Image: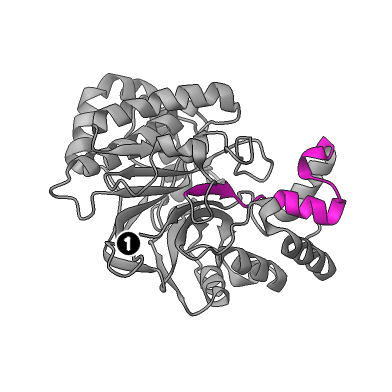
Amino acid sequence: MAAKPFTRAEWRTIRGRLADDPDRYGLPARVYGSVLLASFNIRKLGSAAARSADTWRFLADICRRFDLLAVQEVLDDLSGLRRLQELMGPEFGLIVSDTTGVFPGEPGVGERLAFIYNRSLVRRTEIATDVTYDRSKLINTLADHHAAIHEATAPYAKKRREYRDRLERFEAGQIPTRPKRPRFKVQMPTFLSFIRSPFCVSFEISGHPGTTPYRFMAVNAHLHFGNFLADRRQEFDALMNWIRARVERNDHAYYPDFVLLGDLNLDFDRPKKDREAIEEHLKTFNDAAGDEVSVNFPFLDEHPVRKRFLRTNARLTETFDQIGLFCRDERFPDYTVNEVMGSRPTGPDYGVFEFGDLFSDALKRRPFRMLGAEARRNLVARFEHKVSDHMPLWLRIPLP
């Protein structure tokens, strides 16, 4: 039986609880002199009819807090995304990618990637593109790893041949039943292409009169989750290498600063152990980028004010989602600033809007972490499809 969604009365209780103390749940205030960058994987954001009016109102009230919001899991049907933008208000602009992750007409769930931005602070400039590895790079990879790729894909190739043979026999009337398309897990030994092409758009954020705006490329990504951790790491490395290569080409890049926002599916369920491995890994990118470029992932650090590692999934077990900075502009916070994040109202600061705690406080009268395991599962089941199974994360930086 499907979990019962929140009733209208429950939504009133939730909105009232949030209005009493938004900071308790990590919802950032609008602070003059600062700008809020954010990322939110809104689960299967498709038809406007798939969510209730109260849910849309809640999502719009939250998303309206952010000046530049990267949204993942937008489906082919754009009516829900347009509904969200409309409820946020006329000052918010929208740019969205085409469907990626599935070939047109073939089975699978394709997704779009979107940016919603506050026109009063953020201006979209000329560039909008996907992030891909070109044909020459792909051919070189295939040549360098030919034997390993052949070994990994041979069992799948055999199943494909058997499927095509049975399909031909079915279409010729030789067998009565159409064969099922094979589903087979392949652990690739190397990166070939992204499961969903990241979406890259150029933006400009104006500050106080007479100051130089922030100018940067925003990369919106929903990376591979998959069956194998190695696949996830390969795709993360590939995106990091692509961004680093563009940042290094300072004389040719449209803007030399990059901000990565999205669901990167990083394995970060054991912060103290995982952080050490990821930080060591990131250090190689910092070293490769040189002294002129800073690479900073604030959400890998324990928040200095909240005194804990912030989680981004609804069950509060993982930090799949991240915001990463690859910047030459020294006004963007580098990793040395992370230990004093949140010390000034205008930033820099970072956080997660933990609506799971909000729902638990409002409806169960205790924090989410204090519920029993079954009670947590039952509560998450009520909102993970209609609100989301990810929570929005944000980065505040002072205006120039």
Q: Amino acid at mark 1?
A: Phe
Q: Is residue 67 above or below residue 350?
A: below
Q: Secondary structure at mark 1?
A: strand
Residue 166 picture location, percent across and down: 46, 39
Regarding residue 2, the answer to whether it shows in the image is no
- In the rendered image, the vertical position of residue 262 relative to residue 159, given as above or below: below
137 in magenta: no
Q: Residues within 10 Å of mark 1 (few under 14, many from 20)?
A: many
Considering every residue shown, the one lying at the far bottom of the view is 90
Front-most of residues 281 and 51: 281
Residue in the picture at 31% in, 30% down: 285
Q: Residue at x 23, y 31 (%)?
A: 290
Q: Quadrant of residue 292?
A: top left
Number of callouts:
1
Quadrant into which the C terminus falls: bottom left
- Residue at the (27%, 68%) spot, across then down: 210
Q: Is residue 349 located in the magenta-colored stretch of the structure?
A: yes
Q: Residue furthest left?
A: 251
Q: Could you say which quadrant of the image residue 16 lies in?
A: bottom right
The location of residue 355, given as percent across then percent down, is 69, 53
Going by the picture, which residue comes out furthest to the right?
A: 365
Viewed as shown, does residue 202 lie left or right of 82? Answer: left
Which range of residues does the magenta coloring cover?
348-373
Which scheme is used to colour this image of the protein?
one colour
In the rendered image, which residue does mark 1 sit on?
A: 203
Return the residue nearer the eye: 377 or 194. Answer: 377
Residue in front for this viewpoint, 72 or 145: 72
Please identify the quarter of the rendering in which residue 305 is found.
Answer: top right
In the displayed structure, would residue 289 be above or below residue 356?
Answer: above
Q: Position of residue 224 (x, y in %)?
A: 46, 40
Residue at left 24%, top 33%? 291
- 177 lies left or right of 384: left
